[in-house]
Amino acid sequence: MQSHIRGFKGRKIAVWGDHILDEYIFTKAARVSREAPVLITEHESEAFRLGGAGNVAANIRALGGIPVPVGFVGADQTGDVMRRVLSDSGISEEGLIQIDGFVTPRKTRILSGDSHTRRQQVLRIDRLNRREASEAERSALLEKLEEIAESCDFLVVSDYLRCSVRGEDLERIRNRVELPPAAIDSRHHLRSFSGMRVATPNLPELQRLFPGSDLGIESHFIGAGKELLRELDARGLLLKRGDEGMVLLEEGGKPQKIGIYGSREIVDVTGAGDTVIALLALGLASGTDLYSSARMAAVAAGLTVMKAGAATVTPRELNDAMKSGNLP
């Protein structure tokens, strides 16, 4: 599996989806206000990271791949900051289409604590886009994706907010060009995306798709997964179920369980799913089979959840974990 990691280098992967700016404001808890029963905190610092589809791109970049983000961005301050973060991360912005009136999604997390303790999140503020892109704007985005996809080894579709990606848009572009193999992570509209190489729903998403099933029963859980695999006409389905690990379903094969890597005492689950799909894309793009790619994804996810915020993993960290022998 360590040899597979070397194959990640230089793999070009289009990341089509909702690119979000994650903002972290670090504060020190000071006192309780005399005006109201609320905590007063003192500002210390702030940091910006790529979130949503942007975090997928950041993970691909950290592991030696070449991500190309594709999606909408607004003509606003958040969009400017996102472009700066992309540039600082060595990630191209050629696939981002700027449109007027679009609010670049931004999630602000306020963390607080004493001077010598780890900061805890006390509040999150979301700024989300509510403006529907016009058909002309969507056509421009699809033309850009066509142009980029021709030179890519793989495509990741990351649908968080249904702003930059729709199932019907995928069908439109497939009718015009041959896309590279693709992986899909869709929070609320997975059934809109068929014909993928692999899909990666988590347990709550699977439960929303099968509301009448008791997915706590193993046979019901596997049965729902197999039905979804048929519905999506996908070649593989990686079912994520938190600290119980993952289950891989492939056409004509038996379910394969993949355990977690590391401790169950996690720090932050933010972005773990982005890490998983980034590893799957890199693995499949470099010729690794889906099962081995999923095992590497489990290791990488185990590393990221031990870090605060939407984190990435380096090839050295992944290699060192592989050498430990405690593989899922």
Image (cartoon, rainbow, N blue to C red):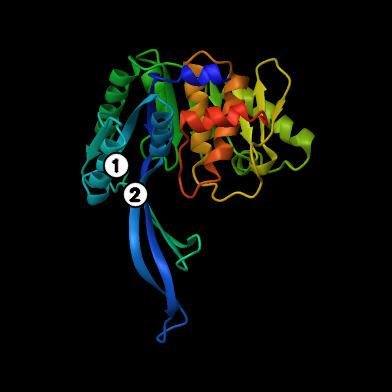
Q: Position of residue 185 (x, y in %)?
A: 50, 33
Residue occupying image coordinates x 51% and y 13%: 287
Q: Position of residue 318 (x, y in %)?
A: 53, 30
226 on left or right of 269? right
Residue beneath label 2, please?
48
Q: Give the amino acid at mark 1.
A: Val
Residue occupying image coordinates x 33% and y 15%: 151
Q: Give the amino acid at mark 2.
A: Phe
Residue occupying image coordinates x 42% and y 16%: 180
Say which quarter of the image contains residue 67: top left
Q: Residues within 10 Å of mark 2 (few under 14, many from 20)?
A: some
Residues 295 and 94: in front is: 295
Asked if 315 appears above or below 270 in the picture, the reply is above
290 on left or right of 164? right
The answer to whether marks 1 and 2 mark residues whose Cβ atoms lie closer than 8 Å is yes
Q: Is residue 128 at all visible to an observer of this figure?
A: no
Of labels 1 and 2, earlier in sequence is 2
Residue beneath label 1, please?
85
Q: Position of residue 264 (x, y in %)?
A: 66, 46
Residues 325 and 119: in front is: 325
